[in-house]
Image (tube, rainbow, N blue to C red):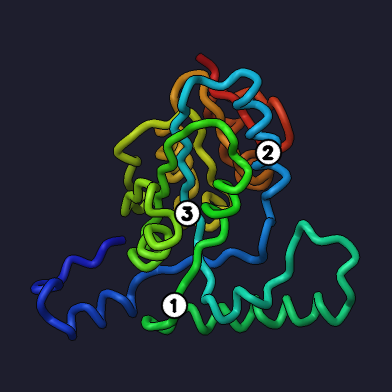
Amino acid sequence: MFWAGRSTATSSGSRWFRDVHDPVGSTSWHNRHLAHFKRLDELLRAEGPGRPTIMLIGPGGVTRLAGMLLNDAAANGSSAIRKLIGDAARYSDQVLRRIPWMPLASLEPVELESVITVPHELVVVDHSRRILSAVRTQLPQAKCLLTDISFQRPSVEADVVIAFNVVCRLEDPGAGMANIVAAVRPGGLLMMDDRSAEAHLWPLHRFTSIAPKIYRRDA
């Protein structure tokens, strides 16, 4: 939920309070969803609309310090020691990313942009100002929306909405799912983790599975 204090633009104390209470979700490791992003690119090249809008919700972030040591999900044959180092970095990041002045990076938006080959508009939605600031630095062309999906709908609709491991972490996952679904244009695509889809997508919303973790909204 947004903090609405007074004099946020001029008071250093207010800025400190805002940063300390700025919720920053974490991304567990590099390229976690890369294979699914590549499949999305194939679908968009084969049958997508011209210049689709792609919305990425809740990408989370990691500290740059820990990010260099995280495991790479796309890498094969990593040694046990390398995996141990990556796991230690991930757990360390849970503490480090709560320090307001630690530089952050958001992995998923950059990885998504690295594989989508069709002309498109990228919209990144998060409830953390620090995450969106990192995204703006990494991807100046992205449109960033400060939105808490728990109780707010994004202000735009998209041809593709990506929300991995977002709904399952919400206090009210049903409301969050409804807000995410509202952002998907009829006939558009939704990418989501299996846990969230099985618990909260199928019972209430009309979508058809077309690929692993990819669902099409019924027109």
74 on left or right of 50: right
| Residue 105 falls left or right of residue 74 | left
Q: Residue at x 45, y 51 (%)?
A: 172
Residue type highlighted by circle 2? Lys
Q: Residues within 10 Å of mark 3 (few under 14, many from 20)?
A: many
- Residue contact at pointers 2 and 3, CB within 8 angstroms: no
Q: Three-letter amino acid code at disc 3? A: Gly
Vertical order, 196 against 14 (above or below): above
Q: Which residue is mark 1?
A: 103
- Which residue is found at the position 46% from the left and 57% from the top? 171
* Residue underneath mark 3: 58
1 or 2: mark nearer the eye? 1
Q: Does 115 appear above or below 42?
A: below
The amino acid type, in three-letter code, at marker 1 is Pro
Report the quarter where the N terminus lies: bottom left
In the rendered structure, which disc, 1 or 2, sits on the residue that comes first in sequence? Answer: 1
User: Depth check: 173 or 218 in front?
Assistant: 218
Q: Secondary structure at mark 2?
A: loop
**Cα distance between the residues tagged 2 and 3:** 16 Å
User: Residue at point 25% right, 82% down?
Assistant: 16
Position of residue 168 measured from the top left corner of the image (x, y, whole percent):
57, 53
Q: Position of residue 167 (x, y in %)?
A: 52, 49
Neighbour tally class for label 1: few under 14, some 14-19, many 20 plus, Cα within 10 Å: some
Q: Read off the residue under disc 2.
A: 213
For the point 57% across and 79% down, which residue is it? Answer: 93
Mark 1 and mark 2: Cα distance apart in space: 31 Å
How far apart are the two marked residues, 3 and 1, measured between alpha carbons? 18 Å
The mark nearer the N terminus, 3 or 1, is: 3
Tell me the element at label 1.
loop
Quarter of the figure with residue 82: bottom right
